[in-house]
Amino acid sequence: MPNNSRREEFSTHRKRKNHPFFKVFLLIVLTIGFAGGTYAFRLYSQAKTAVNATYHPVDDKKVSTNIKNGKPLSILLLGVDTGAEGRIDKGNSDTMILTTINSQKKKVNMVSIPRDTMAQMQYSNSDKFNVQKVNAAYNIGGSSMAISTVEKLVNTPIDYYVTINMGALSKIVDAVGGVDVDVPFDFDYDWQNFRKGHMHLNGKQALAYSRMRYDDPENDYGRQKRQQQVIKGIVNSAMSLKTLGNFEKIMNTLSDSIATNMTFDEMMSVYQNYGDAAKSMKSDHIQGENAWINGASYQVASTKELQRVSNKLRQSLDLSQETLDNEETKQNARNKTFFSNPNVQEYTVYTPANADVSDNAGNVATDDTGTGTNDYNSGY
């Protein structure tokens, strides 16, 4: 078992400004606003039709009135690994960013949630006990479970979600006529060749350029930079006059690749009433500790770190701070040695007494053997 610092593995999860998936959301909103002032009704109508096709409400979630009332709002951005490499399953949400927008304070806060963060899956109609990596929530229960799992993890209400699949990237790039990027170094990936310097990429090239990670000296962080280049190129091309002729194609591409519970009118309101907030965008992330749970590599966030993030998010939504009390804090209390000794990397997930663990494929929870008791609440 490696004994190097647990922080080293997660050094790539540094603060990231202007995350690419947030920019995809901005692309939709900006394109709608641009249409309203250009070809007027025709483009406006096309945009409305395309955006309406992306609308997918969450059945068990109350419709938010925050946008209507001008209150701070929260959006969970999900980048899903479907639509690329021939995948046809639901996939995991390998990119998860909880974004808050406060129009009064004119601030946007983005908190990245590392895909391997340990989390208790939140089922809508049962108390089933299932601890997984947080990115599995989307695979198990779609956007609804992803929302409820993140809400519980950081004790923050989520108003909206925006899901985009990886296959959308190549489609969008082709729809805007390609993108210009500055390649930082030579590399080959997915049968595509990239050479240092300026390059104009088509959709297939852009997808490969955005996915490569292991040959990047900055690993995930370098990949994020390249993704940002591609999305910036998409925004620049989409906003140019030469792209107006492809407007309908662009909007149709977005409608085929994006799902959200935000209506067209709500998007228009965000564009009109929350636009100034984007001038001040702050980035953060949940910092995890490298942990091995039943032989699988996880990131476990300390209770102190989860509380810090919760406080920040709730403050950005003008909510009072509350002490976290969830499954993650309970498990952390049972693993005090893990946090006090940097050489300990084994983390034990304890199953609550009388817990329902039926039909939980991949559940990493272990029996409460070896602790001297089967009382789940003892020691908290």
Image (cartoon, rainbow, N blue to C red):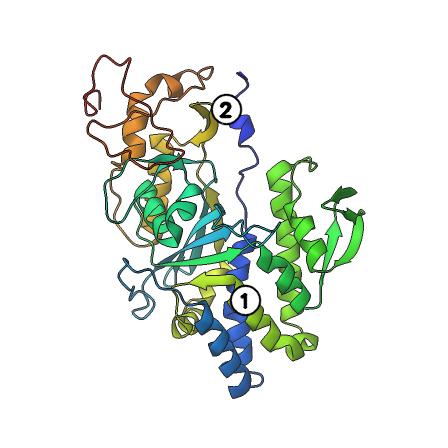
Position of residue 301 measured from the top left corner of the image (x, y, whole percent): 40, 32
Give the camera-side residue of 184 and 290. 290
Q: Is residue 249 visible?
A: yes
The residue under the point 64% across, 46% down is 211
Of 190 and 285, nearer the camera is 190
Q: Residue 82: x and y, percent?
A: 54, 52
Q: Which residue is mark 2?
A: 6
- Which kind of residue does numbered mark 2 sit on? Arg
Q: Residue 157: give x, y in percent of width and height.
A: 30, 52
Query: Residue visible at 66% across and 53% down?
Result: 207
- Give the percent coordinates (x, y) of residue 318: 30, 54
- Answer left or right for 65 relative to 276: left
Task: Inspect the image, locate mark 1, and give the three-letter code of the amino acid beneath it.
Answer: Leu
Which quadrant is the C terminus positioned in?
top left
**308 left or right, relative to 125:** right
Q: Which residue is the site of mark 1? A: 254
- Kindly report the distance in space between the C-alpha atoms of the residues bearing marks 1 and 2: 39 Å
